[in-house]
Image (tube, rainbow, N blue to C red):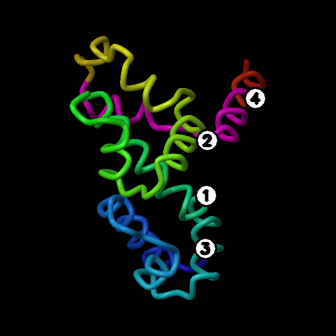
Amino acid sequence: MNLEDLVRLRRARDTMDRDYAKPLDVTALAQVALMSPGHFSRSFRAAFGESPYSYLMTRRIERAKALLRRGDLSVTEVCFEVGCTSLGSFSTRFTELVGESPSSYRARNHEEGAAIPPCIAKIHTRPIRNGEAKSAESATSHNA
């Protein structure tokens, strides 16, 4: 992959980071990267280790976690606020990445992390797909 392709892929990734709540699909993101949808999907996975959809959903779940910690919005409101259009899909993906349902996460006490700066909390609370968690566990057990 050449440097120009990486720059265009980063532009699409930045669009997902900034506009996660907007309706984004592979075709729209491929246009941002000036690539065909198929080439964009393959190149994005090769560059960043996950599909564009997976990356976008991780951004949405990160934002959802912050909104749920605030506690002033319902799970349904949070779902739509972060750009998801199906409460069922949102709840399933949230549970897969976070390890508990959005309702459980919202109901839990989040005060213990209040003193942690948001930039540090974001690093440590980033949702991890099940495959990544298993890879991290096996890597730490091999290094021990």
Q: CA distance from mark 3 to mark 4?
A: 28 Å
Q: Amino acid at mark 1?
A: Glu
Q: Which disc, if any, is residue 41? A: 3
Q: CA distance from mark 3 to mark 1?
A: 9 Å
**Residue 86, position as x, y percentages in the image:** 48, 54
Residue 5 vs 96, above or below: the answer is below
Q: Earlier in the sequence, mark 3 or mark 1?
A: 3
Q: Amino acid at mark 2?
A: Arg
Q: CA distance from mark 4 to mark 1?
A: 19 Å
Q: Are marks 1 and 2 in contact (CB under 8 Å)?
A: yes
Look at the image and tell me in which quarter the N terminus lies. bottom right
Q: Earlier in the sequence, mark 4 or mark 1?
A: 1
Mark 4 or 1: in front is 1
Residue at mark 1: 50
Residue at mark 2: 129
**Which residues are drawn in magenta?**
117-137
